[in-house]
């Protein structure tokens, strides 16, 4: 897939299936990956076929590979460190934007997104942020769209479908 390096993509979808497919495809191509999700890591690996890449759990449960949703600074730092460790480029999937908004408030998360965009543009990273637009009001969605690249979900889905069929047919 051709995605711009140094870009944060907003992937508007009711559930993050396409985002996970794109992430999995980029990691399959050899791009280092880090997935931050509300889904328990072992379950996320199984459910979404995440064979490679680090999976961090967005939860209040104290454990390894857990990021507390209210600790936005730690979340930002984890992404920053990952991007610094992979100056040749890496992909981050941030699944749980709605949860972050619920736990921290919209304005705090919007500031985090703006900061994240600044971090990513300095490097060669790619960030995928799924969002169900139905969970926010129109003005809030528009403000998020303003700060991020809007994913062409139809084109991404078509390309991934073609690649998967090609693999199945041995091509």
Image (cartoon, helix red, strand yellow):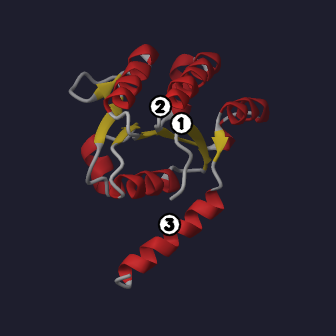
Question: Horizontal and vertical percent for residue 71?
Answer: 41, 15
Using a 10 Å C-alpha cutoff, classify the residue at mark 1 as few (fewer than 14 neighbours), some (14 to 19) or many (20 or more).
many
Mark sitting earlier along the chain (3/1)? 1
Q: In the image, is residue 164 above or below residue 18? A: below
Q: Name the residue under label 1.
A: 6
| Mark 2 and mark 1: Cα distance apart in space | 6 Å
SS of the residue under disc 1? loop
Name the mark on residue 160: 3
In percent of width and height, residue 45 lies at: 29, 51
Which residue is drawn at the image coordinates 48% and 55% (left, top)?
A: 17
> Which image quarter holds the C terminus?
bottom left
**Residue at image coords 41%, 58%:** 25
Q: In this view, does 85 lie to the left or right of 12?
A: left
> Disc 2 or 1, which lies upstream in sequence?
1
- For marks 3 and 2, the one nearer the N-term is 2
Q: Mark 3 or mark 2, which is nearer to you?
A: 2
Residues at circles 2 and 1 in contact by the CB criterion of under 8 Å? yes
User: Alpha carbon of mark 3 to alpha carbon of mark 1: how far?
Assistant: 21 Å
Q: Is residue 14 left or right of residue 17?
A: right
In the current view of this chain or complex, which residue is farthest to the front? Answer: 88
Which residue lies under the disc numbered 2? 123
Kindly identify the residue that appears in the image at 41 percent across and 22 percent down. 75
Q: Distance between the residues labelled 3 and 2?
A: 25 Å
The label nearer to you, 3 versus 1, is 1
């Amino acid at each position: 897939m051709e995605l711009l390096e140094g870009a944060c993509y907003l992937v508007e979808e009711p559930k993050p299936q396409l985002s996970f497919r794109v992430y999995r495809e980029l990691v399959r191509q050899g791009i280092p990956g880090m997935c931050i999700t509300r889904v328990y890591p072992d379950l996320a690996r199984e459910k979404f076929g995440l064979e490679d890449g680090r999976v961090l759990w967005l939860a209040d449960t104290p454990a390894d590979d857990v990021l507390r949703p209210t600790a936005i600074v730690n979340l930002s730092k984890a992404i920053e460190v990952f991007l610094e460790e992979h100056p040749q480029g890496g992909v981050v999937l941030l699944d749980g934007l709605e949860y972050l908004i619920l736990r921290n408030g919209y304005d705090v998360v919007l500031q985090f997104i703006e900061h994240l965009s600044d971090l990513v543009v300095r490097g060669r990273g790619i960030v995928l942020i799924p969002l169900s637009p139905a969970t926010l009001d129109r003005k809030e969605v528009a403000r998020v769209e303003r700060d991020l690249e809007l994913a062409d979900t139809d084109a991404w889905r078509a390309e991934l479908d073609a690649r998967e069929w090609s693999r199945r047919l041995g091509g």
